[in-house]
Amino acid sequence: MSDLTGLTLKAALDGLADKSFSSEEITKAHLNAIEAASALNAFVVNTPDKAVEMAQASDARRAKGEAGPLDGAPLGIKDLFCTEGVESTAGSMILRGFKPGYESTVTSNLWRDGAVMLGKLNMDEFAMGSSNETSAWGPVVNPWRARGGNADLTPGGSSGGSAAAVAAELCLGATATDTGGSIRQPAAFTGTVGIKPTYGRCSRWGIVAFASSLDQAGPMARTVEDTAILLRSMSGHDPKDSTSINAEVPDFASFCGRSVKGLRVGIPKEYRVEGMPSEIDALWEQGIAWLKEAGCEIVEVSLPHTKYALPAYYIVAPAEASSNLARYDGMRYGLRVEGANLTDTYEKTRAEGFGPEVKRRILIGTYVLSAGYYDAYYLKALKVRRRIADDFDQAWQTCDALLTPTAPSAAFSLGEKSDDPVAMYLNDIFTVTVNLAGLPGMSVPAGVDAQGLPLGLQLIGRNLDEGTLFSLGSAIEKAADFRAKPAKWW
């Protein structure tokens, strides 16, 4: 087989099973692709020796008839996941050189099922960003370019490295995390599929924390079925994470291709925002038409507290971040800048170690938690969060899932919004409600804009009902027949 990197995860697993090629062959093909794609800056740590070693071990298991569900599949790991003995920096200078002595639960699950690690993927610092420009290791470049243009575009954030690596065929799939849209928005910007599962479906143990009540791990891949295969391995109850849900993990891939006839799909009227590009609106209408043709019943629903979601999110998330990031003091791990005394050491370490966006969010979070402001901001945001969750509960009385756009635009140029934090935060307008309510959300590539850049549609489901999203997602995938790929320039 000539182009091993162009396979879907499912096709690669089938090829490995029927011995068309070995794990070592497909792993080396991906390692060569990574080496040739340094212009994208998707990987921050390459682990070629480890990858080949894991691939050889996989081939040995397969020869003995002991292959796991992901045996031999080369994957990329977002740098937010701690990987034993391999540098894990969360995209931040303050964790430079940190090599954990332990493995995150999600990556442990992947290695248990036989996956191969190609390396660590670039990301916004501590997952704070919507464009992958806050990384201490420089921005990731989207493999897509506007038709006739050569400007570098953002792959979205914070999982920009994961999205770019999957879109550029540098890995068969990747782990990612989503706190306010960090799986779904990059998936929409790169023509890939990403799912944020129900909060608690995947363990957070060993994932560097940003906002603990919002963070959730999930997969990114090139097809809906591929993400289903990955999510099954990533999920499961973990006693080390007190928020982990003790629920059976279904065979998510079995939901792909199932009939969606009779499913009721809600269209939230509040998501028709002013100033939304007509192409996004047209794509949304097209998605509605596809689901109608597949036999779904379309119903209009109301999520009246949607307009308060962004302000509530940008209070809750920074508040939790200011608490979580207090542990980075230069004493135990990562960067340490010596000062005249203990307080000076703390100040100098944090001043040098944290980037501007992380500092901004820590300051916002510390402010809203401070005496005199806690009730006015943080407590109020928690009440709004509850109302947002109630809106969804109300919607489920009349529908089984929701269909919305994933992002308010296609990928924009690097540097275009970096001077305007509010414009950047507006990228999360369609995604943050899902995190605030703890629900599963998926982005499926559904078309391209006038410049040939990919656009995504978002599906939102009930708690622990990822299966319905995989059924609806594969129906959209089939109808859209999205086959566009970025033209190789790197």
Image (cartoon, rainbow, N blue to C red):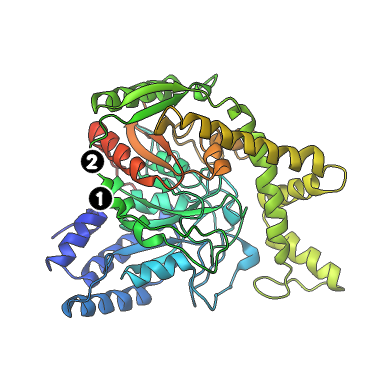
Determine whether the residue tagged by mark 2 lies in a helix, strand or loop.
Answer: loop
Q: Within 10 Å of the Cα at label 2, are there few (<14), some (14-19), or many (20+) other Cα atoms?
A: some
Q: Within 10 Å of the Cα at label 1, are there few (<14), some (14-19), or many (20+) other Cα atoms?
A: some
Say how many tags the image has: 2
Q: Position of residue 413 (x, y in %)?
A: 49, 37
State the quadrant of the N terminus.
bottom left
Judge left or right: residue 60 versus residue 463: left
Q: Quadrant of residue 47?
A: bottom left
Look at 55% across and 39% down and name the residue there: 432
- Name the residue type under label 2: Arg
* Viewer-nearest residue: 84 or 387: 387
Residue 438 vertical position relative to residue 44 in the rendered view, above or below: above
Look at 84% across and 68% down and name the residue there: 344
Judge left or right: residue 53 versus residue 464: left
Pointer 2 with pointer 1, Cβ within 8 A: yes
- The residue labelled by disc 2 is 258
Determine whether the residue tagged by mark 1 lies in a helix, strand or loop.
Answer: helix
- The residue labelled by disc 1 is 254
Q: Position of residue 317 (x, y in %)?
A: 65, 47
* Viewer-nearest residue: 489 or 109: 109
Residue 349 vertical position relative to residue 478 in the rendered view, above or below: below
Q: Position of residue 97 (x, y in %)?
A: 58, 73
- Name the residue type under label 1: Ser
Q: Which mark is residue 300?
A: none
Residue 250 vertical position relative to residue 403 in the rendered view, above or below: below
Residue 197 visible to an observer of this rendering = yes
Q: Quadrant of residue 241?
A: bottom right
